[in-house]
Image (cartoon, rainbow, N blue to C red):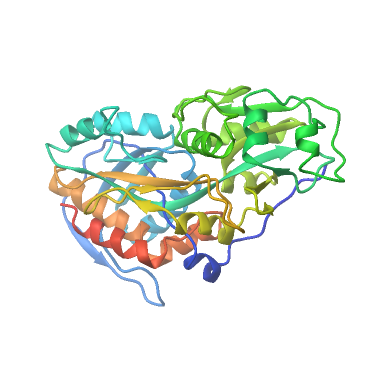
Amino acid sequence: MKLYRYGRLAAVGLAGALALTACGSDDNTPAATGAKPSSTGGGGASIECATGTLSGEGSSAQKNAMDEWVKGYQAKCAGTTVNYNPTGSGAGIKQFNAGQVDFAGSDSALKKDKGEVAAAAKRCQGNEALNLPLVVGPIAVAYNVPEVEGLVLNGEVAAKIFNGKVKKWNDPAIAGLNSGAKLPDGDIKVFSRSDESGTTENFEKYLKAASNGAWTTEPSKQWAGAGEGREKSSGVQEAVKAEEGSIGYMEWSFAKDAQLGIAKIDAGAGPVELSGETAGKALEAAKPEGEGNDLRLKLDYATKEAGTYPIVLVTYEIVCSKGLSADKAKLVKSFLSYASSPEAQQKIAEIGYAPVPSSVASKVTAAVASLG
């Protein structure tokens, strides 16, 4: 079987191109008091360490980024433990609002109309909860078809595959976008997320915006299309890897780790391969929606800009601006200071994410500094 692995992101190309998204982790152990400075030479991050245990929960799309950050942070700050539970964005927000974790990771910002903003403010003792973008996670349409290399899809055809209306790999709708390709006369097996997921919501936002009406349901964290559900990004990854003829959506780093084929997306100006540069162009057009230190963004999923990969998500760290105990506040600030540093952003750029560009990084740094 031919499977395809895309190369590492180049730091220079990414740094000016991309933006945002974030994470979570899990544990309730009270933090120890006291803090000590930690500085590194040779261009490493200099942060103020705080001892104790930090807990968070949420987005599984940025689990691989979290793993890198936890490893790097704990190496700098002895006596500190960061636990992350990748249960999905919806579960992370619920646990944060219930006071069970210190911060949440979500691939969509808190929503006013669903009561999430009000619930978060209550959890933060009447203070605002902030959405801080820290990781960019392009969403890959990943497939496992031995005969097909460089599959091309557009919004309409992707929507018809994922809502079950296009059922065969050699369907004329797919063939029309893949001239000369040897498309098998086999069934398409669709895999999706079964848990509440920000990756699902962002993928459905793309399908809704770019499908010329082929996708009719309103985007939400709960999958509304066809196929079999699997828990977390890792579950979809494993299912697609295990079954030939299958397709699914997942964060880019999961598709890369599994060496799956990744579809090129044609928004009208020709097929675009997923890369740090092409995904970054989609983020350059993002519009700020929050105020002050609340840094939520609005993405344009229907962009037709040449050379732009349109299916991206931003993971936010959801934190209390104030309202945590002094020890927990120090831990949150310390860890996020590291996560937003150039050193930490470079680490995740090497595994399929993207560093926060300087224009956004300065705002994130200021927001983290304001936490108390």
* Front-lying residue, 167 or 14: 167
Image position of 68 with respect to 313: above or below: below
Left or right: 350 with respect to 260?
A: left
Q: Residue at x 47, y 64 (%)?
A: 346
Q: Quadrant of residue 242?
A: top right
Q: Residue, x 72% and y 26% (percent of image)?
A: 166
From the viewer's side, name the closer residue of 65 and 80: 65
How far across and how far down the image is residue 337, in percent? 30, 59
Q: Is residue 16 left or right of residue 120?
A: right
171 or 343, which is in the foreground? Answer: 171
Image point 79% across, 30% down: which residue?
Answer: 171
What is the residue that sits farthest to the bottom in this orientation? 42
Q: Is residue 196 visible?
A: yes
**Residue 237 shows up from this direction:** no
Q: How many marks?
A: 0
Percent from the top left, x then y, of residue 340?
Answer: 36, 59
Residue drawn at 42 percent across, 58 percent down: 72
The quadrant of the image that shows the N terminus is top right
Residue 8 place in picture, x, y as percent: 62, 60
Q: Nearer the viewer, residue 318 or 187?
A: 187
Residue 4 lies, in percent from the top left, at 74, 49
Q: Is residue 264 above or below residue 280?
A: above
Q: Horizontally, is 174 left or right of 19 in the view?
A: right
